[in-house]
Image (cartoon, rainbow, N blue to C red):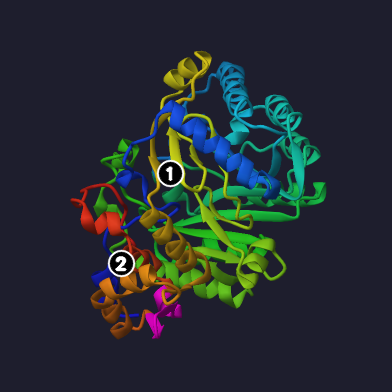
Amino acid sequence: MSTDLVSKYNIPAPRYTSYPTVPYWDDNVTQNSWMEHVKGAFKKFNKDGISIYIHLPYCESLCTYCACNTRITVNHNVEVPYINALLKEWQLYLAQFDSRPKIKEIHLGGGTPTFFSAQNLNHLISSILSTCDLHPQHDLSFEGHPSNTTPLHLQTLYDLGFRRVSFGVQDFDEKVQDTINRYQTFEEVSSVINTAREIGYSSVNIDLVYGLPYQTLDSVRTTVKKIIELKPERIAFYSYAHVPWLKPGQRKYTEKELPVDSVKRELYTVGKELFINASYVDIGMDHFSLPGDELLNAYNNGSLHRNFMGYTTNSTKLLIGLGCSSISDTWDAFSQNIKTVEEYRQVVDEGKFPLHKGHILTTEDLNLRQHILNLMCKHESDFSTNSIDQTIFNQNIPRLTEFVNDGLIVLDGQKITLTDLGKLFIRNICLAFDARYWSQAKMENVFSTTA
C-alpha cells in the first residue's frame, strides 16, 4: 500500500456504528414519539430477542487517549445511586412493553464497569434479569480493566450468565502507558485472562490501540506478540482517534508525539501481519478472531451485525441503551440519553425518559443504513435489486470509479465487493454513500481520521 494512497484517504469519517451518524441526526424525537417507536419495535422484534447496553461511566483515573463519556472519581459511594437510576430507567421501558422481554444480548460498557463492586453489579443484573426471559442464544458480555477486575467480579458475572469478557490493554510499552495514563502489566493481563478461563468464560477479547503517542514499530510488535501468547479469542486493534477539541485529556501530548500518517499505517500493518500469522482472521474494521469464535462464525455465515456496541453476533433490531449518554435503537429511530450523570439521574427520578437527542429514520435513511451495514459486515452490497438502489448506485459512479482505479473495490454490474486493500479503507467507501454527509454542510472537528 502506497504512502500516497494513505494520504489520499486519510480524511475525517465516521466509524458507522449507525446510519445516519449522530452529528447528522434531525433531533426530531420527543418523549411521546420515542415511546411509540419503542412500543412498535417491541411488538415486532421481541420474539427474536432484544439487546441491552448499560453504560457505566465511572473510572478512578483518566486515560488521556480515551474518547468515551466518563466520570472520574475515587468515591465509590456513587455506585448505588447510579445503579438505582439505571433500574428506574429500565422500569420506564418495561412500562412500554406489552409482554415479558426476551433478552438476547446484554453488554456492560464504560467507563469501567469493574469500577463497580461485584455485589452492586450482581444487584443491577439480577434485578434486570428478574423481569426478563433469556433468549436460547443469549450473549452476555462486559468490559473490564485488567488491574481492577477481581476473581469475584468474574465469578459473579459468570454465575449471572456472562460468558464473554473484554479487557482494554492498548499497549504494554511503559513510555506509552505513562503518556496515556493507562497502566497494566503483562502479568496482570495474563493472570486475569487465566482466571476468566478457569471460571469458564468461552471468549476473551483484548482491545489494542495503534497510533498512540510514542508508539514505534518495535513497541507495537512487542505488545502484539505478548498478546498473541495469551491467545484471546478476539482482538480489536483500534485506530487512535485524536480529538482533543472534544476530549481535553488528549492535550497532555501534542501531535508531535503521535506517529505520522504513514508510520501509523505501518503500525497497523505490522500488527495485522502478526495476527494473521498467528491464525487470526480479519473479520471487519480493526477486528480479528480465532477460528471457532462466534464472531468469526457470524462473519462466515453472513449474520455479523454492527451497532453502537460495535461488531456483534446478534442482529437484534431493538437495542435499549441504559445510562447517561447511552444510545437506543428501534431500527427506525434512535435516541441518545443525557450525557451528564447528575442531569440523567434527575430526569429519571422525575419519571421521564432521559432523552438528549434523537432521530426518526426516513425511507432513504433505512435504505442506506442497510447498504452501509452490508459493506461493514459482509464487505459487499448489491444495488441492482430495485430502482431506488440503482439510483443510489448511479449517483455515486464517480466515487466508485475512483475506488475501482485505486484497487479498493470490484464492481460486478451493480454489486460492490471490497478487496483486501479496500477493507483498510472501509470507512471511506461507506462515506461515499452517506447522503446526509454529502447533502449537508460539512462539519469541522467531528470525526477522527480514517488512517
Tag 2 secondary structure: loop
Which residue range is magenta in the image? 409-422
> Which residue is drawn at the image coordinates 36% and 57% (left, top)?
364
| Quadrant position of residue 154 | top right
Q: Is residue 183 above or below residue 347?
A: below
Q: Is residue 223 magenta?
A: no
Residue 395 appears left or right of 159: left
Badge 2 crowding class, 10 Å Cα cut-off, few under 14, some 14 to 19, many 20 or more, is some
Which label number is shown at residue 178?
1
Q: Label 2 amino acid? A: Ala
Q: Is residue 266 above or below residue 101?
A: below
Q: Is residue 414 magenta?
A: yes
Label 2 and label 1: CA atoms lie apart by 39 Å
Residue 205 appears left or right of 182: right
> Which residue is drawn at the image coordinates 51% and 51% (left, top)?
307
Q: Label 1 amino acid? A: Asp
Nearer to me, 308 or 248: 308
| Quadrant position of residue 106 | top right
Q: Position of residue 327 (x, y in %)?
A: 47, 39
Label 2–label 1 contact, CB within 8 A:
no
The answer to whether one can see residue 143 in this image is no
Q: Is residue 53 above or below residue 276?
A: above
Which label number is shown at residue 432?
2
Nearer to me, 213 or 23: 23
Residue 215 appears left or right of 153: left
